[in-house]
Image: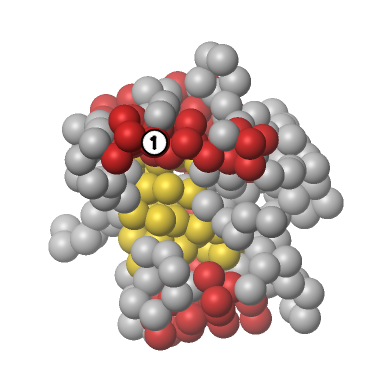
């Protein structure tokens, strides 16, 4: 897409979400404090792929200080692989796996007077739930478990996949997202590897990246969320 074509489009309106709290104790992989000042939604790691009680506590506290909405970022139990290795799991097991992690985060949210805004699966299970109707329904159902009459927990996922279908079927608010830092296959699936680098498209074709953003934010939805992290 040419620059002049992009400039003639209506203004982009999007909500930026970012994976946060993905360190251990004294070890960190990003400057969460600096990032928290630039985002709207924080997907907080819940201990199965990264994070621990100290990191979760600090991350939630930072989110409150910067008025950032907090979501849970549950993973498969795979610390060694950072949650990026697929594993077989029955739907009922996935529900328990997610409830365990989301419940832990909710404890810290309660401590700081916050509520859970959304749930977004991490890594391999994000892709698995996008492809499997059964797993997607299991993941989305956890939103209902933590919702109340006064507050509905949303599900952040990939538009046009089992994520969206399950959310619509179960009556859960769905937030479609587009990844600025990942590449997509020709079929529209995310390319997720254990050793994750930065998007080739984002680095070499920035205008194409912006055109993808425009396409996603043009969807008929309350808002679309951009998942991002610092570009090197």
Which residue of the protein is positioned furthest toward the front in this rendering?
4
| 68 left or right of 46 in image | left
Residue at x 63% of width, y 36% of height: 204
State which quarter of the image contains the C terminus.
Answer: bottom right
Secondary structure of the residue carrying numbered label 1: helix
Q: Mark 1 points at which residue?
A: 3
Which residue of the protein is positioned furthest toward the top in this rendering?
187
Residue at x 69% of width, y 29% of height: 88
| 164 left or right of 38 in image | left
Residue 150 visible? The answer is yes
Which residue of the protein is positioned furthest toward the left in this rendering?
150
Residue 73 visible? The answer is no
Above or below 67: residue 43: above
| Position of residue 109 measured from the top left corner of the image (x, y, whole percent) | 42, 75
Name the image quarter holding residue 221.
Answer: top left
Above or below 110: residue 51: above
| Position of residue 136 measured from the top left corner of the image (x, y, whole percent) | 45, 31
Above or below 143: residue 25: below
Q: Work out whether residue 202 or residue 52 is closer to the camera in this orientation and state it.
A: 202
Instruction: Classify 10 Å Cα crowding around label 1: few (below 14), some (14-19), many (20 and above).
Output: few
| Position of residue 37 measured from the top left corner of the image (x, y, whole percent) | 45, 75
| Total marks placed | 1
């Amino acid at each position: 897409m040419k620059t002049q074509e992009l400039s003639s489009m209506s203004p982009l309106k999007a909500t930026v979400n970012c994976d946060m709290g993905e360190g251990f104790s004294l070890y960190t992989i990003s400057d969460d404090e600096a990032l928290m000042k630039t985002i709207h939604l924080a997907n907080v790691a819940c201990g199965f792929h990264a994070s621990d009680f100290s990191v979760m506590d600090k991350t939630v506290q930072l989110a409150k200080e910067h008025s950032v909405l907090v979501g849970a970022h549950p993973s498969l139990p795979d610390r060694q692989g950072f949650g990026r290795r697929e594993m077989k799991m029955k739907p009922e097991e996935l529900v328990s796996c997610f409830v365990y992690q989301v419940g832990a985060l909710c404890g810290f949210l309660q401590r700081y007077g916050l509520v859970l805004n959304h749930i977004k699966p991490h890594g391999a299970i994000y892709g698995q739930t996008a492809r499997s109707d059964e797993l997607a329904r299991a993941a989305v159902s956890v939103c209902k478990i933590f919702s109340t009459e006064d507050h509905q927990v949303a599900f952040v996922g990939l538009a046009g996949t089992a994520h969206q279908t399950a959310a619509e079927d179960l009556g859960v608010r769905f937030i479609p997202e587009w990844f600025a830092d990942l590449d997509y296959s020709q079929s529209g699936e995310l390319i997720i590897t254990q050793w994750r680098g930065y998007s080739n498209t984002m680095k070499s074709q920035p205008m194409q990246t912006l055109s993808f953003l425009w396409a996603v934010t043009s969807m008929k939805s309350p808002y679309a969320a951009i998942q991002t992290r610092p570009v090197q």
